[in-house]
Image: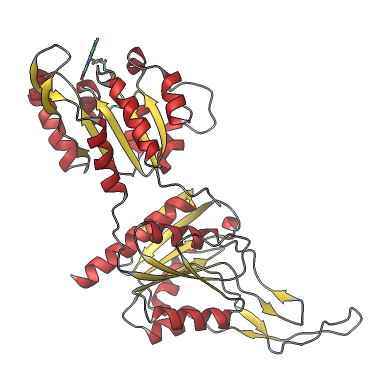
Amino acid sequence: MEREKKGEVILGITASIAAYKGLEVVRLLRKEGYDVKVILTPDAKQFVSPLVAGVLSNNEVYSEFFVPQTVPIHVKLTDADLVLVAPASYDFINKVAAGIADNVLLATVATTRAPVVLAPAMEERLWENKVLQENIRKLSEVMGYKIIEPEEGELASGKIGKGRMRNPEEIVRFVKEILDKKSLAGRTIVVTAGPTREYIDAVRFISNPASGKMGYTIAEEVRDRGGHVILVSGPTGLEKPIGVETVQVESTEEMLNAVIENLEKGTALIMCAAPTDFRPVKRYEKKFKKDVKFEPKFEPTPDVLEITRKRYPDKIMVGFALETEFMVWNGVEKLKKKGLDMIVVNNPKTFGRDDIEAIIVDRELEIWDIGRTSKRKLGKIIVDKVENFLFFDEN
Ligand SMILES: Cc1cc2nc3c(=O)[nH]c(=O)nc-3n(C[C@H](O)[C@H](O)[C@H](O)COP(=O)(O)O)c2cc1C
């Protein structure tokens, strides 16, 4: 399990006289409990040293694009929760708006799906430059970037005017507000995770290799957005997430009962567990001896999603489907058959890993091929979609 963190912030520092204040931003973000990774533009190294940024952030500092690497840095850094550029120079803002990506910071901003916050710092004439103003508007309207407008004050030139970067305390407060946004406050969401076990005799069972990692990650994501999570978990080797109500179950029938009981209080079910689809017709109380002729017969276990959907026709329901072939086709069939709002189709390669290859199909039959991504990132995508369903169904 990943260490409990408040969130990961990438802080870009550009070549402005205000770059030294960027170091104070690093310090304050860390004080707030965020994991901070600093990217310096190559020119920013004329203003602050990578050594100081590294010590203050307690992380590697990124600056050079073309260094030996297995995964390109801007791709490696895409899991951050927020990208902040403070200070953001005139040159940097215009390059971002033009789609230029010829340094690590520009490429990271272009690649990320996390919220991007820019805190400009420059002389007043640069701030008032029409090209810059047009680009600021474009980045804010088209890309949804948040701009922390500079304030009036004494500038590097000694003149008084608008262009001074906001103070680090204000910038960190702004970032905190975005990251601490509790979009699921007041909601109860039931998440299932892990495999189930169906016992044949006193000690032997059939099951599958599901690790529970995906479901636990989703539970943490819902919790981090302020939601009340009831995690119905089959047997996994994972620690119970802090701040999540966990209900431990073993068999598919127990999982079904726990889901039905707890979804009464909930608005949505994210059924990430991999229940064992078959169980022995009879469970023997004792342990079979090796020499006993032993031919167990199996029957299907109850279908948790199908039964739960019939019981709660109006709640949001997300299912997972593990398929070895015809991923989209099988996913669509399952979505329709069980009346789901969304289905996440994946393959057995995902068992036990931290990454996953997935295709998402929603109730409008829109298909997203997510490709290979971390379970953490997929968790965010799934919870974003659930939030959308909740919003649209209520409005
Ligand atoms: C002493 C000095 C101070 C500067 N301060 C700023 C500034 O506050 N804002 C700005 O936009 N550019 C400033 N510049 C210009 C940038 O450093 C220059 O445009 C640089 O190429 C920007 O690189 P970057 O955007 O890749 O970090 C300054 C340059 C110098 C020499």
The answer to which of 35 and 263 lies nearer the viewer is: 35
Which quadrant holds the C terminus? bottom left
Check the image and name the residue furthest to the right: 291
Picture layout, residue 183 above or below residue 260 = above
x 18%, y 42%: residue: 142
- Let me know if residue 307 appears in the view: yes
x 51%, y 33%: residue: 71
The answer to which of 146 and 321 lies nearer the viewer is: 146
Ligand 1, by image quadrant, is top left
Q: Quadrant of residue 114?
A: top left
Picture layout, residue 71 above or below residue 210 = above
x 47%, y 63%: residue: 345
Is 338 placed left or right of 159 in the picture?
right
The answer to which of 93 and 71 lies nearer the viewer is: 93
Residue 79 locus on image (x, y percent): 42, 43
- Let me know if residue 366 appears in the view: no
Residue 374 locus on image (x, y percent): 48, 49
Picture layout, residue 181 above or below residue 319 = above
Picture mark count: 0
Q: Quadrant of residue 29?
A: top left
Residue 311 locus on image (x, y percent): 39, 86
The answer to which of 232 and 22 lies nearer the viewer is: 22
Is 88 placed left or right of 290 in the picture?
left
Identify the image's colour scheme: rainbow, by chain, secondary structure or one colour: secondary structure
Residue 200 locus on image (x, y percent): 74, 82
Check the image and name the residue furthest to the bottom: 282
